[in-house]
Image: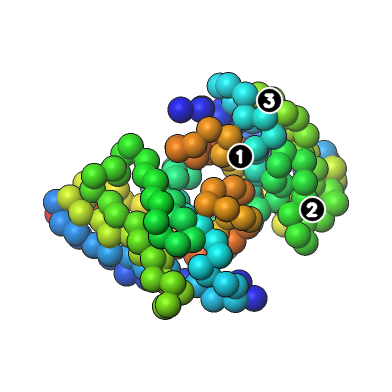
Amino acid sequence: EIVLTQSPATLSLSPGERATLSCRASQSVSSYLAWYQQKPGQALRLLIYDASTRATGIPARFSGSGSGTDFTLSISSLEPEDFAVYYCQQWSNWPPITFGQGTRLEIK
Amino acid sequence: EVQLLESGGGLVQPGGSLRVSCAASGFTFSRYGMNWVRQAPGKGLEWVSSISGSGGSTYYADSVKGRFTISRDNSKNTLYLQMNSLRAEDTAVYFCTRPIFGVVNAFDYWGQGTLVTVSS
């Protein structure tokens, strides 16, 4: 089973700042990696798939990079609505599909 | 507009059974594999099970294998998860998800989830 480790667990930033979230895989997942945003009371939202492709309707301030074992989700200038929990997911070697444990992005 | 609407959650005793459903609309249901993902209270996401578009292929997490059964009725655009021999650790919100394509991929649509609580 491929283990995804996200860091940091919590990130405290202010609106307008740049956020950098990390996801590291225990073995290569090639580019079979996605990022999701979760807010209370809302359906999970796909942000990035295939490591760097923005999903439909996702603002350009969200970007993904990496391949193999190290991946990054960047948010160039934080908007108030971006404060949420973010998960990475891999489907390179399944079953099982696995998710990271999440990064909570909170307002400083 | 794609919509996934789960139902059937509730309180069940340990060892009991429950079936949750997911009504899909806004896309050609039979052309997509479908998945169940769960989230225990205050915890992260855990993949549970996948099924191909035809229903002929199914896949399970080790934690539920032999206890849960995924199925679908393409004439009703509905996905199911039959859960037997339920344990306290199965307590979670169960989400129905659709992959971008194929059976498993990134999941571009998620339902709001249905809460299953296993407790005496």
Choose top left, top right, bottom left or bottom right for residue B63: top left
**Label 2: few (<14), some or many (≥20) within 10 Å?**
some
Q: Label 3 is placed on what type of residue?
A: Gly
- Residue A88 - label: 1
Choose top left, top right, bottom left or bottom right for residue B66: top left
Choose top left, top right, bottom left or bottom right for residue B116: bottom left
Q: Label 1 is placed on what type of residue?
A: Cys
User: Which residue sits furthest top?
Assistant: A27
Q: Nearer the viewer, mark 1 or mark 3?
A: 3
Q: Quadrant of the C terminus of chain A?
A: top right
Visible residue check, residue B101:
yes
Mark 2 lies on a secondary structure that is: loop
Q: Label 2 is placed on what type of residue?
A: Glu
User: Along the polypeptide, which appears first: circle 3 or circle 2?
Assistant: 3
- Left or right side of B55 for A12: right
User: Along the polypeptide, which appears first: circle 2 or circle 1?
Assistant: 2
**Label 1: few (<14), some or many (≥20) within 10 Å?**
many
Name the residue at 77% across, 61% down: A57
Query: Number of labelled discs?
Result: 3
- Residue under pointer 3: A68
Between A61 and B6, the one lying in front of the other is: B6
The x and y percentages for residue B87 are 21, 46
What whole-number distance in Å separates the C-alpha atoms at marks 3 and 2? Answer: 30 Å
- Residue A21 - label: none
Q: Nearer the viewer, mark 3 or mark 2?
A: 3
Mark 3 lies on a secondary structure that is: loop
Mark 1 lies on a secondary structure that is: strand
For mark 3, name the chain: A
User: Along the polypeptide, which appears first: circle 1 or circle 3?
Assistant: 3
Do the residues at pointers 3 and 2 share their chain?
Answer: yes
What whole-number distance in Å separates the C-alpha atoms at marks 1 and 3? Answer: 14 Å
- Residue under pointer 2: A79
